[in-house]
Image (cartoon, rainbow, N blue to C red):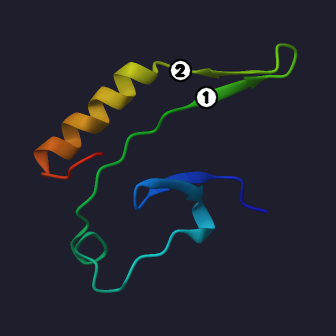
């Protein structure tokens, strides 16, 4: 079972539920932004710890700005 989530069409969903059309510009020409945001689950504290979230998110926003991709 795939437990990975993506942000697609202004919402979070399971990765295997996200679909694009074959005429999508990003699909055909490789136009996209990617930034990995890693988090670690602490079982003892029942808490998720995100590694350098602000730095990664800022880089994602900057990449989107360069490609004129609006982030809501």
Q: Secondary structure at mark 1?
A: strand
Name the residue rendered at 72%, 60% in the picture.
2
Q: Are marks 1 and 2 in contact (CB under 8 Å)?
A: yes
Q: Is residue 32 above or below residue 54?
A: below
Name the residue rendered at 36%, 30% in the picture.
57
Label 2, on which residue? 51
Q: Position of residue 10 (x, y in %)?
A: 40, 55
Q: Is residue 53 above or below residue 3?
A: above
Number of numbered discs visible in the structure rendering? 2
The crowding category of the residue bearing disc 2, from other C-alpha atoms within 10 Å (few below 14, some 14 to 19, many at least 20), is: few
Q: Secondary structure at mark 2?
A: loop
Q: Position of residue 51 (x, y in %)?
A: 53, 20
The crowding category of the residue bearing disc 1, from other C-alpha atoms within 10 Å (few below 14, some 14 to 19, many at least 20), is: few
Q: Is residue 41 left or right of residue 17?
A: right
Residue 21 quadrant: bottom left
The quarter of the image holding the N terminus is bottom right
Q: Position of residue 15 (x, y in %)?
A: 58, 61
Label 1, on which residue? 39
């Amino acid at each position: 079972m795939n437990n990975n989530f993506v942000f697609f069409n202004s919402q979070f969903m399971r990765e295997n539920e996200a679909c694009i059309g074959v005429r999508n510009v990003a699909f055909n020409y490789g136009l996209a932004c990617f930034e990995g945001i890693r988090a670690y689950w602490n079982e003892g504290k029942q808490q998720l710890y995100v590694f350098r979230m602000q730095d990664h998110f800022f880089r994602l926003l900057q990449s989107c700005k360069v490609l004129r991709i609006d982030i809501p």
